[in-house]
Structures are given as structure tokens and as C-alpha cells.
Image (tube, rainbow, N blue to C red):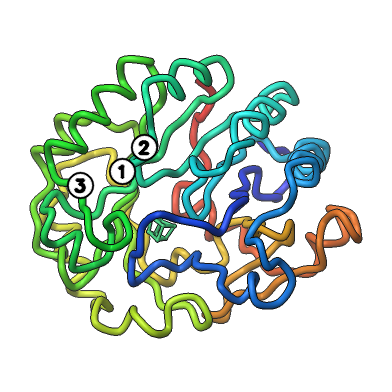
Amino acid sequence: MPKTNKIPSINFHLWEPCNMRCKFCFATFQDVKKTILPKGHLPEKEAIEVVKQIAASGFEKITFAGGEPLLCPWLPMLIKTAKNLGLTTMIVTNGTKLTDSFLKENSMYLDWIALSVDSLNKENNVRTGRAIVGKKAFGNYDYLKIIDLIHSYDYGLKINTVVNKINFQEDMTAFIKYAKPKRWKVLQVLPITGQNDFGVEEFVITKSEFNKFIELHNKISVMIPESNNEIKESYVMVDPAGRFFDNSKGVHNYSKPILEVGIEKAFTQVNYDYNKFLKRKGLYNWIK
Ligand code: SF4
């Protein structure tokens, strides 16, 4: 655990492409594609170098996110690099590409899997776009099957749920009790200019609607609610172009690329709040 007040965990959004079309997605990175990274990702070698710099600068846990990171052919190499350099490793996935062979082959290097589950109702998932190309959604049965698979390889399980206008009254208690995640992160849908401006409005909820969802599940001890205010500034994030970014002003603010100016200098160009990180229970015993 850290001796300074530097946030010790980092999210590397290594890959813009995604096979889902969540209308409230706050990591679409279309701005990144249009400005400096037409392919939506760094070449493999550069992505590995970013991971090496992250490890060398003292971070302790890395979460590979996207887009959908499992679409990236060199994700296993990034995970292995991070693990061999002493980091705790995690991926955030929508689950559609999580296969038995991936779980088997990466079990030595990958510690945690964070599965995004917003609703157990297929129709609701199609409404929000949390579906393959916005059309083919997972439901309760599909998610239970994935969870059984994850547990069969003894990964640490986390579940992420974005609470929005469609699901804020949904009772997920039975599902979470079955899934037994070590952490259940419950996030209020977050509007970010330049990321989800053209889809998020119909899904935005008030604080009291968000609290309704929290109250409905208040017996679940592993639930960690994060309102819009708690999300902002409390995550250290790197974009697909290898730049730090923050969302403190409701829009992504990017640093210079890590591989251009070095990780320490790039880090000074963004804003993070360590106390907010602590408040959202970002520090926990993540060592497997
Ligand atoms: S699955 Fe994740 S990355 Fe893909 S569109 Fe949905 S929220 Fe965005």
C-alpha cells in the first residue's frame, strides 16, 4: 500500500474499439480517434512500453479497459508484462468475448475480472445499447454462465453496474448474491462532453433516483456506490493514445503522451484527488 498520497491504481483504456453500443458510454474516445489516433489504439510495442513506464513509476495495480479490451490481440502480452513487473492486474469487460481458453491461458497473470452488468433484462440492455452492435443483448442466464466460468478459474470477481433511467428500479439482489463478487461497483450514469453528448440525456438520473437503487440493495455489503461527484477526479486514467486524462470538468482533459514527455511529467498535467479516491474506497486489499 502506498506511503505517499499518490493514487496507486491506474486504468489503462488501451483500446477504443468495442462491440457494444452503450449510449451512455463515457469512454468512446471518438475525439482521440479524430485527433491523434485514427486506429483507436497504439501499436503493440508502444502499448507495452506504456505498461512498463506505469510499473516503473510506482503504480501497484493496473486495470485494462477500453472500449472492449478483449478485442485487443495483444492484451495477454500487456497483462503478462504488468504481472511480471509486480503489478496486480485486472480487466474490465462486457463479457461477450470472455472464453474458457482466455481464462485458462491468463490465470497465471491476471488477478481480477470486472464484469459490466447493468441489467439482467435483455430488452433493457437493448434499450441502453449494452448489446452486441446495439442489438444482441445478454440476460440473466448469460451473465450467470460467465460468472460460473470466472469462478471456476478462481479469479477475483468485481461487477460494475451503471445506474441509469432504465434500470434504477431493478432489483439485482438475487443475482449479486449468486455471483458473490468481492466488490460491486454501482456508478451513476455520467455525462461527459465529447464522449456521450448525443446519447446520454435520456438515461441521466437524479441523485434521488440513484439513491433509490442504493437503498434497494442496501443489504449487500460489497456494494460500493459512486455518484457523479465521487467518480470525477478519483481515477487515474490513461487513454488509448497513452496520455493521462481526467474528467474533473465534465470533459476529458488530456496530458501529453507518456512516451513523448515521460510518465512523471505527463502526470503533472492532469488533476486527481487522492481523498476522493480514498472516499470511494479505491484502496482495498487487491493482492490475490
Ligand atoms: S461495453 Fe463498455 S466500452 Fe463498450 S460501449 Fe459499453 S460502456 Fe462503452
**Mark 3 or 1, which is nearer the eye?**
3
Q: The residue under label 2 is which amino acid type? A: Lys
Percent x, y of residue 126: 19, 62
* Count of numbered labels shown in the rendering: 3
**Proximity of marks 2 and 1: CB atoms separated by less than 8 Å:** yes
Residue at image point 27% right, 31% down = 146
Secondary structure category for the residue under label 2: strand
**Number of residues whose C-alpha sits closer than 10 Å to that of mark 3, classed few (under 14), some (14–19) or many (20 or more):** many
Alpha carbon separation for disc pair 3 and 1 = 19 Å
**Proximity of marks 3 and 1: CB atoms separated by less than 8 Å:** no
Residue at image point 30% right, 60% down = 162
Mark 3 and mark 1 lie on one chain; the one further toward the N terminus is 3
Residue at image point 49% right, 39% down = 91
Residue that extends furthest to the right in the rendered view of this protein: 261
Secondary structure category for the residue under label 3: loop
Q: The residue under label 3 is which amino acid type? A: Phe
**Number of residues whose C-alpha sits closer than 10 Å to that of mark 2, classed few (under 14), some (14–19) or many (20 or more):** many
Secondary structure category for the residue under label 1: strand
Percent x, y of residue 190: 39, 72
* Residue closer to the observer: 90 or 8: 90
Q: Height in image: 270 above or below 191?
A: above
Compared across the picture, whether 149 is left or right of 243 comes to: left
Q: Which residue is mark 3?
A: 138
Q: Quadrant of ligand 1?
A: bottom left
Alpha carbon separation for disc pair 2 and 1 = 6 Å
Q: Height in image: 196 above or below 128?
A: below
Q: Which residue is mark 1?
A: 184
Mark 2 and mark 1 lie on one chain; the one further toward the N terminus is 2
Compared across the picture, whether 246 is left or right of 18 comes to: right
Percent x, y of residue 180: 24, 29
